[in-house]
Amino acid sequence: MFLERIHKPKDLKSLTLYQLKDLANEVREYLIDSQARTGGHIGPNLGVVELTIALHYIFDSPHDRIIWDVGHQCYVHKMLTGRLDAMRTMRQNAGSPGFPAKDESNHDVLDSSHGGSSLSVALGIALANRQNNVNNLPIAVIGDGALVEGMVHEALNQIGNEKIRMLIILNDNGRAIDANIGAIPNYLSQLHIGEKVNDKMFTPLGIEYIGPLDGHNLKTLIINLKKLKNITKPTVLHIKTKKGMGLPYAEKDPIQLHFSFPFKKETGELITEPIEKNIFYKPKSKFNAVMIGQKITEITKKNKDIVIITPATRGALELHNCFKEVPERCFDVGMAEQHAVTLAAGLSVGGMKPIVCFQSTFFQRAFDQLVHDICVNKLPVLFILARSGLAGLDHATHHAPLDLSYLSCVPNLKIFFPIDHIEFNIFLENISKKWIDSPTILLFPYGTIDTVEPNNEEKILLSEDIFDKNNVGIILSTAGRIKSALKIKKMLSKHKINFAILNISQIKPLNQELFVKILNRYQKIVTMEENVIRGGFGSSICEFAIDNGYKPEIIRVTLGDVFLEHGMRSYLYKKYNIDENSILEKIKNRWNFKSS
Ligand SMILES: Cc1ncc(C[n+]2csc(CCOP(=O)(O)OP(=O)(O)O)c2C)c(N)n1
């Protein structure tokens, strides 16, 4: 057994090639075992076992800086840099994130989980090295999926011009999450291992190109990486790998090949009966996204003007069926967020009805395109953002806690956060019958129907008269917090403290008439949202009150002014004192309500 003896990359250096091959087998076995237990990005990591071993064998991390693009393929790197234990706690509350984390190890250059940044980071380090006469090697490891990102091409433009010492490893497996589509992957697919390649992509830009090599052949990797130790020019080493290498059954389900919930090691079948308390198994009830994806498919089939655009995130909105059933009007543009939004502008100008579907956290990348190309031009484009607010166990950067803040400030933009998938789908049905007249965003939270949406009993509470004379205040809830709000109302009423409750689905523009009535009636207001404190829903209520001469007492329940780490909702709510009990205490203390 070699793996348990590797505490740092230096421990690899004395191994022979045969021993390194044994190590690769052990790593693969360990990965499959631990991923079967915890779930995670199994396929990408099985694909880089040999590459990661070879990189740490030849180079000298953390002196040489290895930057993993996206970062979801860093598990083997964690295992070889003294963090074998990280694999045990991955995808768990308070555990190791399944992405690079610089506070966890100085072998991780930056925290990341959004793709396309590695070349810019590596170039920045290379330029700093030149200034400071430092001779370490920045190494960006980027997949063919992330290679499509606009930022990568902005970086290549400068890299080719700088003639600087940096290495780019292009890990080409033909896939992003789904098959990688487009002219760039088409080009790469024409280059074959063992054939003499006349590279037309990097060489013309002044960047050396080597490859493609078999990325699972340790000997080849070691020989070639060794030759690159002393490069003085930017160099691309193109390797071909297989996602999920060594796990044959993963190939049956191409999505599971990228990411999997915990599974049975022998068959690959997902585990649905919980075994360990801290592990997040594939939920039995349906994800919101499933219900919403079905409706998107239905309206797209019926309305021949609708076009669907997504930047490599079909899964977040369960759009696979839509792509199968209406292939001529569904566009997966690859990891190209900015382009996805401005493409919608063009489609709208051309007379189509674009629905742009994003996993919310990645929408941050396309802010200027939203502002400049869509909103300034008042184009009737519909955006659907999945996983707004807290987004689970991947990484802090996978949450989308800024949505309401950075979207609310954009003129001409309407923002809705429907209370549940039923209301969401009514919105969609109505929009498909009478198309929007201005840019519009619909958001929904990560989770299953029963975790984020009110049940029938709770819906009765929601339909009570909000102006009932017995109420001493009102809870205004939005953005995924209705479940908690309903619980708090019930808990307060047990103490004979009656609060009205109202879910606000229309975030922008605010329904002025309604809020004037609320402010005339209530002095005590609690706002609840899964968004940072500044610029969110609670902020807009405060502004509305001040602007209209009201001085209510407001408690804002928000995600605060911090980046929350990965974790399940219930864990993070408790940790940040925004769980139901903490909110109840806050309300009682602030307004001196006595328990009864
Ligand atoms: C900016 C951004 N868009 C989308 C994603 C979601 N995402 C995570 S991994 C991935 C595919 C990455 O493909 P590739 O770079 O080829 O790496 P591979 O998984 O194939 O090794 C996508 C689309 C992301 N992390 N960042």
Image (tube, rainbow, N blue to C red):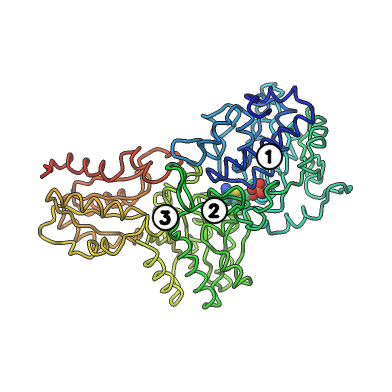
Amino acid carrying mark 3 in the image:
Pro
Picture quadrant where residue 340 is located = bottom right
Query: In the rendered view, does 183 fall on the left or right side of 461?
Result: right
Quarter of the image for residue 460 reads bottom left
Query: Which residue is painted at 31% across and 52% down in the image?
Result: 540
Q: Earlier in the sequence, mark 1 or mark 2?
A: 1
- The earlier-in-sequence mark between 2 and 3 is 2
Location of mark 2 (residue): 270
Residue 445, numbered label: 3
Q: Quadrant of residue 203?
A: top right
At label 2, counting other C-alpha atoms closer than 10 Å, the crowd grade (few under 14, some 14-19, many 20 or more) is some
Residue depicted at 29% across the width and 63% down the height: 511
| Residue 120 appears in the rendering | no
The local secondary structure at tag 2 comes to loop
Q: Specify few, some or many for label 3: CA neighbours under 10 Å numbering under 14, 14-19, or 20 or more.
A: many
Task: Say what amino acid the circle numbered 1 marks.
Answer: Val
Marks 1/3: CA–CA distance: 32 Å
- Residue 206 appears at what percent x and percent y? 79, 41
Label 1: which secondary element: strand
Query: Residue shown at 31%/39% (left/top)?
Result: 577
Which residue position holds label 1? 141
Mark 1–mark 2 Cα distance, whole angstroms, equals: 30 Å
Q: Amino acid at mark 2?
A: Leu
Q: Nearer the viewer, residue 209 or 11?
A: 11
x and y, in percent, of residue 204 in the image: 81, 46
Quarter holding the C terminus?
A: top left
Q: Relative to 96, does residue 267 appear above or below in the rendering?
A: below
Q: Name the residue: 25% across, 43% down.
A: 581
